[in-house]
Image: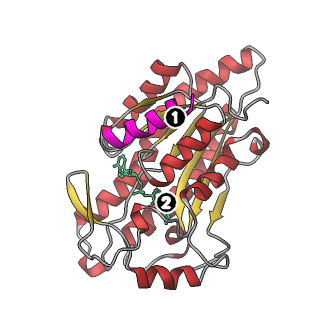
Amino acid sequence: MSLKLEGKVALVTGSGRGIGRSIALKLAGEGARLVINDLDAEPAMETVEAIRAAGGEAIACAGSVSAPDFAERFIGTAVEGFKGLDIIVNNAGYTWDSVVQKMTDEQWYAILDVHLTAPFRILRAAQPVIRSLAKADADAGRRNVRKIVNISSVAGLFGNAGQTNYAVAKAGITGMTRTLAKEWGRIDTTVNCVAYGLIRTRLTEATADARSTATIDGRDIRIGVNPDVMEMMARSIPLGRAGTSEEAAGAVYLFCIPESDYVSGQVLMCTGGLTGI
Ligand SMILES: NC(=O)c1ccc[n+]([C@@H]2O[C@H](COP(=O)([O-])OP(=O)(O)OC[C@H]3O[C@@H](n4cnc5c(N)ncnc54)[C@H](O)[C@@H]3O)[C@@H](O)[C@H]2O)c1
């Protein structure tokens, strides 16, 4: 049986954990060759090893997507390592919440950098590479639609108290998606977006410990959600529960397969049926 993404080269940011890791495993399971990124080498290498152990191909490109030189390095890793570039998933990110009157410039820019500036730089660096690969495909009479999938959130579509920075960044990525869908049709590339509701990962882990933090870009950032809040949020979801990272990966996968070659500029909500917050 042939695999849906046999031989495709796929890049996924923030794929050392959570949704990104599940996306990488899903794409690799369908035959794609993966460039895995995460802040630190350790989680990135764990995903690389998991893919290799299952018989797939993967290489790591560790480092912060917010670093100014990251985009060129990331795209370069795919081109040098696998001689191609077919799928990019802009997934890396975290939240750093405050009500607006307490939000610092540092908080504002850090979240815009990771969720908006980084995807912009990655896609800017990818464009000339995709253009020349698309031309080579056309010259050789090969049909190959390339795929970009950006990750947004219901916070970006409907707003969420305490998340001005995150909601603005996640709203911005939908604008980038629709704009590049218009620019990139001529290079046979679809650009779509998946907006998640509540997905169970480290970011949304139920924890009663208000001091639960992760070190991200040298800062200790609060992670996890109070269990009571989690339960209340889950009750408002038509399917009655938070999604799993595997279910979240499924929505990205839909945009990566040949069956969606004529779908571009779309924002798909993966929310268990929630249509607003
Ligand atoms: N979990 C949810 O409910 C939910 C809801 C809406 C949107 N999202 C979005 O989904 C994406 C994935 O989140 P998740 O829930 O899997 O979180 P997660 O914390 O489980 O995984 C995110 C990964 O991204 C990495 N990362 C963070 N900043 C990075 C940086 N600067 N450079 C490289 N890697 C970086 C982290 O180290 C981590 O491994 C994010 O964009 C998030 O905003 C998640």
Which residue is depicted at the point 25% across and 51% down? 217
Q: Which residue is mark 1?
A: 51
Give the residue at x 56% y 62%.
244
**Is 21 part of what is drawn in magenta?**
no
**Dot 1 crowding, Cα within 10 Å, few <14, some 14–19, many 20+:** many
Q: Is residue 250 above or below residue 167?
A: above
Q: Main secondary structure of the magenta part?
A: helix
Query: Residue extending furthest front?
Result: 53
> In which quadrant of the rendered view does residue 30 lie?
top right
Q: Are marks 1 and 2 in contact (CB under 8 Å)?
A: no
Q: Amino acid at mark 2?
A: Gly
Q: Earlier in the sequence, mark 1 or mark 2?
A: 1
- Give the image quadrant in which the ligand numbered 1 is located: bottom left
Image side of residue 159 versus residue 166, left or right: right
The CA span between labels 1 and 2 is 32 Å
Element at badge 2?
helix
Quadrant in which the N terminus is drawn: top right
Q: Quadrant of residue 261?
A: top right
Residue 132 rendering spot, x and y as whole percentages: 59, 21
Point out which mark residue 172 bears. Answer: 2
In the drawing, does residue 194 fall left or right of residue 104?
right
Q: Position of residue 198 (x, y in %)?
A: 53, 70
Image-quadrant location for residue 101: bottom left
Q: How is the image coloured?
A: secondary structure
